[in-house]
Amino acid sequence: MTLETFFIEPKTVMMLQGDIGTDISNFLHLLLDPLLFAIQDEELRRIIFSTIIWSCLIICGLVFVVYEVPTVLTLISGPQSQSFTKQNRETKDGRAEAATASASRHQLSLAKSQEEREKREAAVKQTGVTVATKLVKDRELLRLSVKIKNASNSHINMVVVDLNLPSGIDAEVGSFRMQRLGTINAGEVKTADFILRPMGGDPADIGGYVEFLGASYEVSKIPLPVPEMEGLYSE
Amino acid sequence: MSENELSNEVENNFYPLIIALLNFSVLLLLAMENMSNAVELWDFIFVGAGVYFSVKFIRLIRAAHEFRETRVSVQTRSSFPTEGVYASIRNPVGAACIYMNIAYVCFTRSFVLVPIVPVFIALWYIFAAYEEKILLQRFGDEYREYMRATSMFRGSGFDQQRLASSGYDMY
């Protein structure tokens, strides 16, 4: 917006513009001149640089030391005596407690993974999506069909079928190990076909999963079931 | 994993500390000897970049140490963190130290550090790869799946991770 829009006399406009320009220039000069003048001093620039650089290096070093202090203390004082005695104590049946602890940790980890598996299975059941696989021998090749049925009430997006092939079975040239099926609407069935070349591997070991985005944007993953064999092991 | 179980783990992850001591003591000595005294425009840019990488270093170190597992050796870790900074970066301490190496190059503004720093970056990479190999052996598919959704040193947005995990970013 210019001053002409206010219907002011052109002479006044020129005078006002000139005054504003001069005022801004004067103000900036007052503000920046001391800074520019100071920065022109090479020695001062060097001091500022040095201060910034060494401050950064020292602060970073201190941060690292502060966060690593517990480890440093353990390194200097050795492992905590409590845990040392714990490792050497023996239980009634003669097993070292450390071994028992390790076994219980292993047990805990197993229980945890079992729990997670069950949770995943329950979540998969809730999605209402079912997967069936069929393996057909086609001359020297194998054709794997992965049939995905969306029995839920809402569509699923970004459906991906990804195979984990065992050694001795490869995807045929031109056939990919992964296929994207896009969206599957409620009640719809889609099939992904893979052409595989067996080279001594066991087809029963073919694994993989179907991954998709549910209606509420949660990612679900269904492992492929063991394929139903057709024309295999019959010769 | 219970709080009790976590507190029983001994903080024995000495390797990052040892590598960092070796790395930064060498770089510090070289920086003290060879730091450029020039104060031209390019020096301003390089020092600015150095400050930026230093801030990244602090941010990553702080975020990594929010998890106690960071200070527990991979051989004795009973779980691996997948939240916070670990939701996008698998090895934040290594990433932080690599950024700090770059910061040293920017601060020193000398070609002396140029052949040295890649050696240390390689060292951090080897250490990260070694840790991941052990974690893969210990946690198997669970860790493999986590690896697919994250990157070793550089983080990315949530959408990208989800796409990477689903295979939609492959083509």
Image (cartoon, helix red, strand yellow):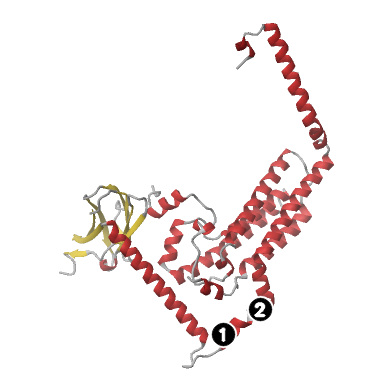
**Subunit ID for the residue under disc 2:** A
Q: Which mark is residue A86?
A: 1
Q: Which residue is mark 2?
A: A78
Which element carries disc 1, helix, strand or loop? Answer: helix
- Of A49 and A22, which appears nearest the observer? A22
Q: Are marks 2 and 1 on the same chain?
A: yes
- Residue A53 in the image, given as x and y percentages of width and height: 74, 50
Q: Quadrant of the C terminus of chain A?
A: bottom left
**Subunit ID for the residue under disc 1:** A
Q: Quadrant of residue A219?
A: bottom left
Q: Is residue A160 visible?
A: yes
- Residue B27 in the image, given as x and y percentages of width and height: 71, 58
Residue A96 to residue A3: above or below: below
- Of A9 and A165, which appears nearest the observer? A9
Q: Residue at x 47, y 56 (%)?
A: B150
- Identify which amino acid the numbered label 2 is placed on: Gly
- Of B95 and A75, which appears nearest the observer? A75
Which element carries disc 2, helix, strand or loop? Answer: loop
Q: Residue at x 44, y 69 (%)?
A: B139
Residue A71 to residue B106: above or below: below
- Identify which amino acid the numbered label 1 is placed on: Lys
